Every structure is written in C-alpha cells, then in structure tokens.
Image: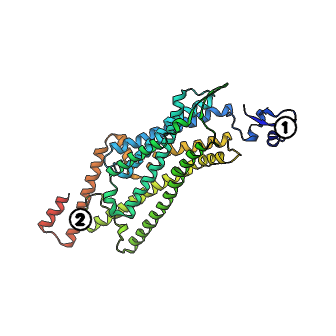
Amino acid sequence: MSTFSAEQLSQLCPGLELDVTAATLIELPPECIRAVGESSEPEEWTKFPMAFIFAALAVIGIVGNILVITVVFKVRGMKTPTNCYLVSLALSDTLFFIATTPTELSSLFTKDYPFGSLCCSLFTYLPYLAINSSALSITAFTVERFIGICHPFWARTICTVKRAKMIICGIWIFSFIYNFPWLFLSGLIIDEEGGYCDFKMGREDWKYKVMYVGDLVGFYVIPMFLNIVIYAKIAIVLSQCGEKAKRKEPAAPTCTLLPTQVMTEGKESHITGRRSSSKGRNQVVKMLALVVFVFATCWLPYRAMVVNNSFRDEKWNSDGYIFFSKIMIFINCAINPILYNLMSARFRGAFRSLFHGKGSAAQKHRERTATLSTYNRCTSIEQREGKRNDDVNKRIYTAV
C-alpha cells in the first residue's frame, strides 16, 4: 500500500477531510488512487477482453512472422538481401511475443509472479533484446535500399545475401551483449503480499537512467532520424528518375537498374523489363518505409510514457494509457506480415505458393511463360525489321 504525507495528500485530494496535525503518514485511500496517478488494478470486467486482445495479437504475430521466415527460406527466389533483414525483424517480433505474452496475461489475474526469479530476469532481458535487434534490423534494410537505389554500382558487391547474413549476425551479437545488464538490473521482489518482478532500482537511480537513455537514443531516436533522412533521399532519387523517364532523357547513374535477371533482346522487351523493375523497386521502398513508419508510431506512446515517468514527478500510470501503449507495441510486432502481403505482389505470390505446396513448380512455370513471351516479342520485332538470317535466329533461340 502506498503512503503519502498528510500535506501531500491534502494537495492531491482536496476533497478529503484530513487533519494535517494528527498524523505525518497515512495510507492512501482507494478512492484517491486515480487522482494521484497511482496505477491500480484493472476493473474486473476489463480483464478478459484485455487478455483476449493480448492473446489474439500474440497468435497472429507469432504465426505470421513464422510464415514470413518460412516463405523466405522455402520459396524459390525469395532469398534477397532485403528479405534477409525482414527475417531478422520477424525473429525479433516472434521473440518479443514469446517473452512478453505470458507475463502480460498472468499480471491481469494474479498479483504474484508465477514464473520464478530466473524467468523474471530472462523475461526482462529478452524483450529488450527483441526491441533493439528489430530497430537495428529496420535501419539495416533502410541503408541496404539506399545503397541499392542511390548507389547501384556499389550494390553489386555490398548488397549481397552473404553480406546481409554477416550484418544480421553482428546485429544480434551486439544486441545480446548490450542488453546483458538487464539480467542483473531486474529480479523477483518479495513483500508481505507476495512476489512480483520489477527493476531492482528506482527510476531515480542513475544506473536506470543511463540504461534507459542509452536505449532510447541508440535504438529509437537515432534510428528513426536516420530512416527519415535516408527515405527522403530515396524519394528524391526515385522522383528524379521518374521525371527523366517521362522526358525520355538518358538515365543518370543513380537511375541505372542493376540486372536481376538475364537481359533479353529486343527493344520492347528492354522497355517492359525496365518498367517492371522500376515499379517493383518503388513498391518495395514504399513497403519498407511503411514498416518504419508503423514501428515509430506504435512505439511512440510507450517511449513517451517512460520518458515522462523517468524525469518528471507527475507520472503517466493510468490503466487506460498503459493498456493502449502495450497494445500499440503488440500491433507493431504483429502487423508486419500483413503489410508485406498488402504492399508486395512478390510476397503475396510467395505465400500462395507456400500454401498450395507448389512454390518451385509455380515459379518455374512463370519463368518459362515469361521467357516464351519474350521470345515471341523478339521474333516479331526481327521479322518486322527484316532480320531473318540464320545467325540471328540461332542467337534468339539460344536465349530461350
């Protein structure tokens, strides 16, 4: 039970009749809890809806992110550098749900922490690991897209699957080490009402402030600032390329598309390929930018609450706000697979291939159909231009 001096309580709860001279400390009355911003137990009727929302988002998020990982590894043609970073992000989101859902659900129905001291430290450490690794993965695929679009010739050697895997390993190793102190800064605290999992120091403690400020700046403020700057630059480059294409001007070096497939012959094929590649490139950039925007927006309420509660005397501890901020975080971790399907035709096709159990066959059929179509267009062009010699026909047929 929280205690306040009579002088403090008379200011916080002016409607109460208090004899200030009668006592120096009094127990905080239940009717005054919300007035002073102290967190209280959720209303009984709200517990089951809250539990249902947490559980539903967790199931959707875990299943969706596991499907993303499976699609990238199982469906042919999905192992790209960008998708490797999306796999890292999916791993982070899955880990977050595994580490937070049990404690969130149990806290709604019992005051005692049921998982023990070891799980208390572990379930504090793992969410920070997941959050920070996801922020770094998002920044990594933003930089990868920046290089691929704004410096395409560098991308030949930099934006590779092998290098992406190395960077992802570095992200997770760094996150493991950086967040390690959280294992020792939290623990199971026992009092007369039972045990509860909490930080071993208060928000006023300098160790907490150092850890929190480092976490806020290094894994939210700086990454989001970099993402905004980089996507602004990407938008400018894509806009310039689009204008040059409309005016049919020679493409600048930054507008040059890296060949992702074998180039086919013929003017019509070349133009169609460039248009398709440009459309796909813009689609991927929009999808990734939306992922960044959702991440920044969904984490903002919680980050703002912790900043306020760490550095101001007036706390934001109302049940409604805490529930809202946690739900926003759960939504962020669950929504990415949905965004991929809404924004990316390639991901939609990959998911369909996975569910129908014929990913490779379907992919081969599409490639064979596209190649035959290209052959027919090229043959038509050659016939119109009168180039029907055996050498040309042999070269076109060999390209098929």
Amino acid carrying label 2: it is: Glu
* Pointer 2 local density, CA inside 10 Å: few below 14, some 14–19, many at least 20: some
Residue beneath disc 2: 265
* Pointer 1 local density, CA inside 10 Å: few below 14, some 14–19, many at least 20: few
Q: Is residue 267 left or right of residue 287?
A: left
Q: Position of residue 122 (x, y in %)?
A: 50, 34
Say above or below: 67 vs 193: below
What residue is rendered at 65% in x and 45% in y? Answer: 309
Circle 2 — which element? loop
Q: Is residue 366 left or right of residue 33?
A: left
Q: Which mark is residue 188?
A: none
Spatial separation of the CA atoms under disc 2 and disc 1: 86 Å
Q: Position of residue 208 (x, y in %)?
A: 59, 43
Circle 1 — which element? loop
Q: Position of residue 213 (x, y in %)?
A: 57, 49
User: Is 292 in front, or is 29?
Assistant: 29
Please indicate, yes or no, whether residue 298 appears anywhere in the rendered image.
no
Q: Earlier in the sequence, mark 2 or mark 1?
A: 1
Please indicate, yes or no, whether residue 40 appears anywhere in the rendered image.
yes
Q: Is residue 303 left or right of residue 6?
A: left
What residue is rendered at 32% in x and 63% in y? Answer: 153
The answer to which quarter of the image holds residue 397 is bottom left
Amino acid carrying label 1: it is: Leu
Residue beneath disc 1: 16
Say above or below: 291 vs 125: below
Q: Position of residue 320 (x, y in %)?
A: 66, 41
The mark closer to the camera, 2 or 1, is: 1
